[in-house]
Protein backbone atom coordinates (compact mmCIF):
# COMPACT_ATOMS: atom_id res chain seq x y z
CA UNK A 1 0.00 0.00 0.00
CA UNK A 2 1.15 3.51 -0.73
CA UNK A 3 -0.01 6.60 1.14
CA UNK A 4 -0.64 10.17 0.02
CA UNK A 5 2.45 11.12 2.04
CA UNK A 6 4.48 8.65 -0.04
CA UNK A 7 2.96 10.14 -3.17
CA UNK A 8 3.69 13.79 -2.35
CA UNK A 9 7.35 13.05 -1.45
CA UNK A 10 7.33 16.27 0.60
CA UNK A 11 6.67 18.33 -2.52
CA UNK A 12 3.25 19.47 -1.27
CA UNK A 13 5.10 21.33 1.48
CA UNK A 14 8.01 22.40 -0.70
CA UNK A 15 5.90 23.72 -3.60
CA UNK A 16 2.48 24.65 -2.12
CA UNK A 17 2.10 27.47 -4.67
CA UNK A 18 1.76 24.82 -7.41
CA UNK A 19 -0.89 22.78 -5.60
CA UNK A 20 -4.57 23.13 -6.39
CA UNK A 21 -7.73 21.38 -5.21
CA UNK A 22 -7.80 19.58 -8.58
CA UNK A 23 -4.24 18.30 -8.14
CA UNK A 24 -5.11 17.14 -4.63
CA UNK A 25 -8.15 15.25 -5.95
CA UNK A 26 -6.05 13.73 -8.74
CA UNK A 27 -3.40 12.58 -6.24
CA UNK A 28 -6.03 10.94 -4.02
CA UNK A 29 -7.42 9.02 -7.02
CA UNK A 30 -3.95 7.99 -8.21
CA UNK A 31 -3.14 6.61 -4.74
CA UNK A 32 -6.51 4.84 -4.47
CA UNK A 33 -6.28 3.15 -7.88
CA UNK A 34 -2.61 2.23 -7.38
CA UNK A 35 -3.49 0.53 -4.10
CA UNK A 36 -6.33 -1.36 -5.78
CA UNK A 37 -3.84 -2.59 -8.38
CA UNK A 38 -1.22 -3.57 -5.80
CA UNK A 39 -3.91 -5.49 -3.89
CA UNK A 40 -4.65 -7.49 -7.06
CA UNK A 41 -0.90 -8.01 -7.60
CA UNK A 42 -0.49 -9.15 -4.00
CA UNK A 43 2.69 -7.22 -3.18
CA UNK A 44 3.60 -3.71 -2.08
CA UNK A 45 5.81 -1.33 -4.02
CA UNK A 46 7.56 1.92 -3.12
CA UNK A 47 6.83 5.24 -4.83
CA UNK A 48 9.90 6.48 -6.68
CA UNK A 49 8.19 9.42 -8.39
CA UNK A 50 4.85 11.01 -7.55
CA UNK A 51 3.62 14.53 -8.18
CA UNK A 52 6.10 16.70 -10.04
CA UNK A 53 5.69 20.48 -9.96
CA UNK A 54 6.90 22.04 -13.22
CA UNK A 55 10.50 22.68 -12.18
CA UNK A 56 10.85 19.20 -10.71
CA UNK A 57 9.52 17.68 -13.93
CA UNK A 58 11.86 19.84 -16.02
CA UNK A 59 14.80 18.59 -13.94
CA UNK A 60 13.77 14.92 -14.23
CA UNK A 61 15.84 13.07 -16.86
CA UNK A 62 13.63 11.64 -19.59
CA UNK A 63 10.42 13.20 -18.25
CA UNK A 64 7.90 14.20 -20.89
CA UNK A 65 7.14 17.95 -20.94
CA UNK A 66 3.42 17.10 -20.71
CA UNK A 67 3.93 14.31 -18.16
CA UNK A 68 0.87 13.20 -16.21
CA UNK A 69 3.07 13.52 -13.10
CA UNK A 70 2.55 17.31 -13.43
CA UNK A 71 -1.16 16.93 -12.73
CA UNK A 72 -0.74 14.14 -10.12
CA UNK A 73 -2.35 11.65 -12.51
CA UNK A 74 0.72 9.36 -12.65
CA UNK A 75 3.01 7.45 -10.34
CA UNK A 76 6.26 5.55 -10.78
CA UNK A 77 6.69 2.51 -8.56
CA UNK A 78 9.97 0.76 -7.88
CA UNK A 79 10.10 -2.52 -9.80
CA UNK A 80 13.76 -3.54 -9.64
CA UNK A 81 13.22 -7.14 -10.81
CA UNK A 82 10.53 -6.23 -13.33
CA UNK A 83 8.00 -8.63 -11.85
CA UNK A 84 5.26 -6.03 -11.47
CA UNK A 85 5.73 -5.05 -15.14
CA UNK A 86 5.75 -8.74 -16.06
CA UNK A 87 2.48 -9.38 -14.23
CA UNK A 88 0.88 -6.26 -15.72
CA UNK A 89 1.65 -7.53 -19.24
CA UNK A 90 -0.06 -10.88 -18.48
CA UNK A 91 -3.76 -11.43 -19.14
CA UNK A 92 -4.50 -11.07 -15.42
CA UNK A 93 -2.56 -7.82 -15.20
CA UNK A 94 -4.19 -6.36 -18.30
CA UNK A 95 -7.60 -7.24 -16.90
CA UNK A 96 -6.70 -5.56 -13.61
CA UNK A 97 -5.67 -2.34 -15.45
CA UNK A 98 -8.97 -2.45 -17.34
CA UNK A 99 -11.09 -3.13 -14.24
CA UNK A 100 -9.39 -0.50 -12.10
CA UNK A 101 -8.94 2.18 -14.77
CA UNK A 102 -5.17 2.55 -15.12
CA UNK A 103 -2.77 2.77 -18.05
CA UNK A 104 0.93 1.87 -18.05
CA UNK A 105 4.02 2.72 -20.04
CA UNK A 106 5.51 -0.25 -21.86
CA UNK A 107 8.09 -2.10 -19.71
CA UNK A 108 10.71 -1.58 -22.43
CA UNK A 109 10.56 2.15 -21.59
CA UNK A 110 10.54 1.75 -17.80
CA UNK A 111 13.48 -0.39 -16.70
CA UNK A 112 13.49 -0.82 -12.93
CA UNK A 113 10.20 0.97 -12.45
CA UNK A 114 6.53 0.88 -13.42
CA UNK A 115 4.75 4.00 -14.65
CA UNK A 116 0.99 4.02 -14.06
CA UNK A 117 -1.50 6.75 -14.89
CA UNK A 118 -5.20 7.34 -14.35
CA UNK A 119 -5.88 8.84 -17.78
CA UNK A 120 -5.41 7.32 -21.24
CA UNK A 121 -2.49 8.35 -23.45
CA UNK A 122 -3.17 10.66 -26.38
CA UNK A 123 -2.50 7.88 -28.88
CA UNK A 124 -3.43 4.22 -28.92
CA UNK A 125 -6.42 2.39 -27.58
CA UNK A 126 -4.81 -0.17 -25.29
CA UNK A 127 -3.75 -0.12 -21.67
CA UNK A 128 -0.03 -0.08 -22.55
CA UNK A 129 1.70 2.73 -24.40
CA UNK A 130 5.12 4.06 -25.28
CA UNK A 131 5.99 7.43 -23.74
ZN1 LIG B 1 6.24 8.10 -14.66
Image: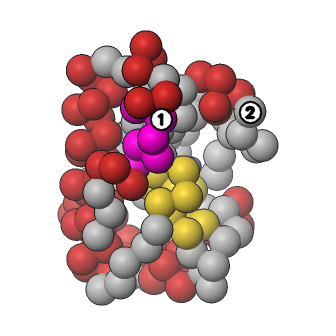
What residue is disc 2 on? 59
Q: Where does residue 45 sit, x and y in percent of width and height?
A: 43, 73
Q: Which element carries disc 2, helix, strand or loop?
A: loop
Q: Does the residue labelled 1 lie within 8 Å of ligand 1?
A: no
Left or right: where does residue 112 sit relative to residue 2? right
Residue located at (66% from left, 71% from top)? 112
**Which image quadrant for residue 13?**
top left
Up-down: is 32 above or below 93? above
Q: Residue furthest top?
A: 17
Mark 2 Cα shell of 10 Å, populated few (<14), some (14-19), many (≥20): few
**Which image quadrant for residue 37?**
bottom left
Residue located at (37% from left, 78% from top)? 44
Q: Where does residue 54 sit, x and y in percent of width and height?
A: 59, 22
Residue range in magenta is: 7-12
In this view of the protein, can residue 125 be seen by the observer?
A: no
**Does label 1 or label 2 sit earlier along the sequence?**
1
Mark 1–mark 2 distance (CA, rounded to whole Å): 14 Å
What residue is disc 1 on? 11
Amino acid sequence: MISLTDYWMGRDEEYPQFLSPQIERNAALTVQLTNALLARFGQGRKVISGWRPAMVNAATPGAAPNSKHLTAQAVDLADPEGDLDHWLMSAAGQQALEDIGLWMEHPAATKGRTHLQTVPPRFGGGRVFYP
